[in-house]
Amino acid sequence: MGLAASYPDIDQVKEVLETYLPERTKRYSRNIPDSQSGESWLRLVLVTGELLRLQPAPDATPITVAVHASASEWRECFEKISTPEFSAARRALGINKHSMLILEDIADAAPSSDELMDTLRNQAIDKSECGIVRIRA
């Protein structure tokens, strides 16, 4: 199972981000494209691309995974999302894991959606809260 997860409401998102990531929230708040959208706040401040609901195994409880894709400059971003502050914000928002997809030379042969979902499920089984998933042609 892999479906888009619903985003928390805007009031909850703002409260959590202001509590756990106050400087980052203040710095990026002027650049939020839709200030009334929890999704917009999470994309910019918490570095989420999408929220997915994944069931790592048939008998496992589904979890919420933030997914962010990057083709370059991912190391600094990964270090940032791996900090205790980002972790606390994710937990407060009910996000269990954060996966960073590193896209490497896939212009001609991108993985199928099934292959991508299988890769994300495998990452969800991993014990670490943040993970890197390399996507190659």
Image (cartoon, helix red, strand yellow):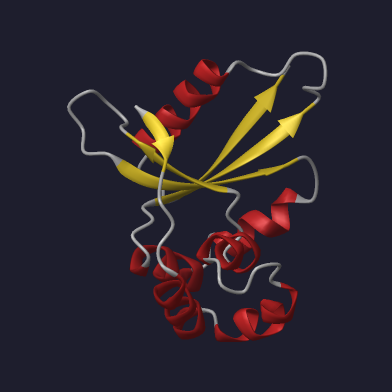
Quarter of the view holding residue 44: bottom right
- The residue at 62%/86% (across/down) is 23
Taking the image as shown, residue 22 lies to the left or right of residue 95, namely right
Residue 109 lies, in percent from the top left, at 75, 13
Residue 28 lies, in percent from the top left, at 70, 77
In the rendered view, would you say 108 is above or below 67? above
Of 7 and 71, nearer the camera is: 7
Taking the image as shown, residue 116 lies to the left or right of residue 105, namely left
In the rendered view, would you say 128 is above or below 34? above
Quarter of the C terminus within the rendering: top right
Count of numbered circles on the image:
0
Residue 67 lies, in percent from the top left, at 54, 45
Quarter of the N terminus within the rendering: top left
- The residue at 80%/45% (across/down) is 72
Residue 8 lies, in percent from the top left, at 40, 63
**Residue farthest along the left direction in this orientation:** 59
Quarter of the view holding residue 11: bottom left
- The residue at 64%/79% (across/down) is 24
